[in-house]
Image (spheres, grey):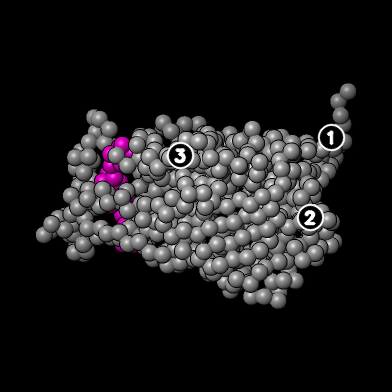
Amino acid sequence: MPVPKLLALLFFSICLNATAAPQHGIAMHGNLKYPANFEHFDYTELNAKKGGTLKQSVLGDNFDSFNPFIVKGVSAAGVHYLYQTLTTQSEDEAFSEYGLIAERIDIPEDRSSVTYYLNKMATFSDGRPITSADVKFSFETLTTNDKARPFYSAYYADVTAVELIDSHTVKFVLKNDLNKELPLILGQMPILAKHYWEANDFGTSSLKLPVGNGPYKIESFEPGRSITLTRDPNYWAKDLPVNQGRYNFDKLVFEYYKDNTVALEAFKAGEYDFRVERTARNWANAYTGEKFNNGTLIKEEVTHERPTGLQAFVLNSRRSKFSDPRVREALAYAFDFEWTNKNLFNGQYSRADSYFENSELSSSGLPSGEELTILTRFKDKLPTQVFAQEYKAPSTAKPGSLRKNLRTAIALLKDAGWEIKDQKLTHSKTNEILEFEFLLYQKDFERIAQPLIKNLEKLGIKSVIRVVDTTQYVNRLREFDYDVIVAGFGQSNSPGNEQREYWHSSKATQPGSRNLAGISDPIIDELIELVISAPDRESLIQRTRALDRVLLSGHYVIPNWFNPVDRIAYNHKLARPKVSPKSGVSIDTWWMK
């Protein structure tokens, strides 16, 4: 029997404005993997033993702050263990958040808001309860305090109001329903103790022990040498399903080393327990000796399924010498990855050709479908190669060669107005000489930059390496005071608001932002918003590919390489779950035998 028209309209109206029952978690697209009554994540072990001390290394020379949320200072290793968030992300789903401080989450059908119901058992490390007032204070401090990292103001820009429903219920009013991931990433916001920070200067880097709400507290520290955290026996969330099998060590010790070679030798001598190796030469040649032979130390490769993002030589396009994309493209032809991989990395790496490498989000082939439809909007303003050819980083593999690549670079530089005068590459109109500096804080990268520098010399370009200490490096990055750096842009399976921090025009001149290349392009700005507002998974993939393709066409970086495995070495007394999460090795699920 047909439904009367008026009744049908009324039914539709009710459904449209209905509010679903509060849930234990939120999935970005599709359904949650874990039901409301789940006991633990599949990649954790319920019988993981509690106890023992885990020692790890940190490459650096100092720290002067326990506040990782501000622009000023260098925060100590491990301080993220002091702070908890409203929700926690599972590591074996594309993007799902489950209740932590917030035990339930409520999102109306029209996505006009998100309401978090706080766990009434949640407390700070001093025993004070966590309330909705702390949540509002945290949001306002992170997004409006000019000393806070600018990441937060970009990440949560589409929140229009925060309403306190009661002492344990807080509602975020959203600008519109286009920012699909906003309810999830709001759950990732660290919750600060209002009563503590109102009595202390949030913007000052300090080694005063803070009030947190996480599984560990600071036991002792010595700036530049070490910091020790101890598991809080009164940690309020230790019995929650999301924490079962996690945070198993009684103590976490982070030892500081100024030199990576010294740190490696210290590991082999047994001075710490767990190490992630990021240097291919070390992995191929240095993990040998009696302790590896007799099983005291274990070397292992663990395959992961996470996007590797992009590591690259980042060119600061704020500098006039790098403002022309033809110059930036030319410099990429001077980097011989194939030689580097063979002679320095023992052939362990693959070349990166995407900002979203090792994932379905990476652009490939020629644009088609929704991606092509999106890019066609900007056809008159985009380089023709965006539509005509797939991006591939310059290669010297046969039939290519370094000589051919350098000839291509010379042609690009000439087209941009540069020519060699007195053996120096000089701009024909301004007489500016093209010379620049590689700013590094790890000596390991000198051996990678040196061959590139020699190839640049063949183009008449003089470049040098400057290695500085960690503090100076961090400060210069925050002020964009560099020519070329080595940096990585980590990505997830569900990109969204963080893309503003990486590439949006509004961040190009904001000190402390992650827009390291100085990108300022209205097309990229619009593509970022399309990614954020993607209505479903397939649309997210297509929109991200479009963003990737346009970023690559700007030649803001010289892509490096990637490896789809985690290279780890550890003491045999450590144990880990049989199942590794898709995101890779998670040390927080390990334990002492």
- Image location of residue 98, percent across then percent down: 73, 45
Query: What residue is at 77 percent from the left and 52 percent from the top?
Result: 237
- Image location of residue 456, percent across then percent down: 23, 51
Q: Which residue is mark 1?
A: 8
- Residue 13 shows in this picture: no
Q: CA distance from mark 2 to mark 3?
A: 44 Å
Q: Main secondary structure of the magenta part?
A: helix
Residue type, mark 2 in image = Trp
Q: Classify 10 Å Cα crowding around label 1: few (below 14), some (14-19), many (20 and above).
A: few
Asked if the residue under mark 3 is in contact with the one under mark 2, i.e. CB atoms within 8 Å, the reply is: no
Element type where label 1 sits in the image: helix
Left or right: 192, with 504 as reference point: right
- Marks 1, 3: nearer the viewer: 3
363 and 260: which one is in front?
Answer: 260
Q: CA distance from mark 1 to mark 3?
A: 77 Å
In this picture, which residue range is highlighted in magenta?
319-342
First of labels 1, 3 by sequence position: 1
Element type where label 2 sits in the image: loop
Q: Is residue 17 above or below residue 232?
A: above
Query: What residue is at 80 percent from the left and 64 percent from the top?
Result: 127
Q: Is residue 192 above or below residue 588?
A: below
Q: Which residue is mark 3?
A: 290
Residue type, mark 3 in image = Glu
Query: What residue is at 66 percent from the left and 69 percent from the top?
Result: 209
Q: CA distance from mark 2 to mark 1?
A: 48 Å
305 and 141: which one is in front?
Answer: 305
Dividing the image into 4 quarters, which one contains the C terminus? top right
